Amino acid sequence: MINVTLYELSKTTIIKKLTAAQLKCLQDSLTQEQKLNLSSVLPLDIPLKLVLVLNLDEEYWRKKCFENSWTHVHYWLSDRDWKKTFLACHAENVIEDFILQKTPLPEVENSLLILKDCLRSLKINGYKFNYANIKTESFDPVDTKEHIERNILKLVSSFKNLEEIHFYNFPIDLELFVETNDDIRNSTNELSEIFQEMKSLLKFSLVGTPSKSIDFPKLINTMISFDTLIYLNLSCNQITDDNCEHISKLLEQSRIQSLALSNNFITNKGAEQIATVLKENEYIFELKMNKNLIADKGAISIMQSLMSNTRLLKLDLAHNKIDSQCSLVICDLLGENKTLQSLNVTANPLGKETGKLLRDAIRRNTNLLTFEFQFCGFDVEDQDSIQMHLLENYQAHVQLCKLSPIKTADECIN
């Protein structure tokens, strides 16, 4: 019988010689129980282009990931989906081999073409260019780097169904965003067209690219054009107050839910601009502005804006220049805001007196679940008192979620 043949074939090398259509036909002939068991008998070394035509369960993709040492860290970063984990890591490795000049472009294109309709997340680690530049002595590193950059962006354009794109330290001098001559203008338009064709983009990261090398207004306008975009990471880009006008525009005109501006050069002026539009924003629930140059005036503006904002759940202002002058507004925030669940002010010189004020103020707050204040100069007794109250909030929150007919406790906390 054909059903038996499929299981017998799975134990031989013959299965690798079948076409995708033949494999799909064989799978369709199985009973439901046999289909569920198929993942346990199918060899891991079947070519990927064949495996992708089969509807295999998570266990098969988990084994494929472990075979390549892509374990639970990658899994959690891929929304706890083993197939998504495997495809994302596989694509990342293929592109890294191209950057390192281990694999020629035609072979890379063929490898990625297989993933054209199923790849949902793509991450490109630009630090690999550091190794590529010293790998061969017989080429001009600058010309080669530009050539590789453009080919990578061309490859990205073939994935219309991408939901996530993450560029980390990608060495685009972003002439692709800077309009200084006709050639660069054409490149900018080309990149804009690439993004416009991606109708399902949810998350975008551009990390480690200096803002002075970017046409920042154009970048922001491109992000605003995505109705689907909910996550944007612009950390480590040397963003200054001059860019914050455009970030404010982003918050006004987009539906971004999570915005990361960590490790930049934003001061009070930029923070005040962002605070102005944060008051009425109905979408953002997470804002990261840690490791900037924000002092009391900027922090006060941000926190005052949250007196009327009923959406933001997480605020990170760690490693800035906020001192005791901000203590009263933090107390007001804890007393009046009924939405915020996570606040991080770690490594700000708030001082002992601020710790005592916050110890008393937090007793009026029932919604805050995490409050990070390491290296702020609080007394140990005040730290312990604050943590005990947070534990009470957490336990009450979990209990409330358990009673909810809509959400589980884990869903509620996340």
Image (cartoon, rainbow, N blue to C red):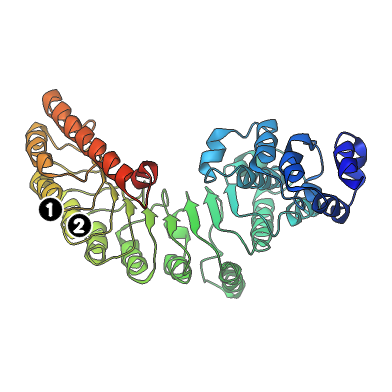
How many numbered marks does the figure carry? 2
Task: Assign a secondary structure to mark 1.
Answer: helix
**From the viewer's perspective, is 241 left or right of 258?**
left
Numbered circle sitting on residue 306:
2
| Image coordinates for residue 259, horizontal then vertical, percent | 37, 55
Answer above or below: position of 353 versus 220: above
Frontmost residue, 247 versus 339: 339
**Which residue lies most toward the top here?**
380
Q: Residue at x 77, y 53 (%)?
A: 53
Say if mark 2 contacts mark 1, CB within 8 Å: no
The quarter in which the C terminus is drawn is: top left
Task: Assign a secondary structure to mark 2.
Answer: loop
- The Cα–Cα distance between marks 2 and 1, rounded to whole angstroms, is 9 Å
| Image coordinates for residue 300, horizontal then vertical, percent | 15, 53
**From the viewer's perspective, is 19 left or right of 130?**
right
* N-terminal label among 2 and 1: 2
Residue type pointed to by label 2: Leu
Name which quarter of the figure residue 117 lies in: bottom right
Residue type pointed to by label 1: Glu
Q: Residue at x 32, y 42 (%)?
A: 402
Is residue 346 shown to the viewer in this render? no
Numbered circle sitting on residue 112:
none
| Image coordinates for residue 86, horizontal then vertical, percent | 65, 43
Frontmost residue, 387 versus 352: 387
Label 2: few (<14), some or many (≥20) within 10 Å? many
**From the viewer's perspective, is 263 left or right of 68?**
left
Label 1: few (<14), some or many (≥20) within 10 Å? some
| Image coordinates for residue 339, horizontal then vertical, percent | 23, 53
Residue topped by disc 1: 336
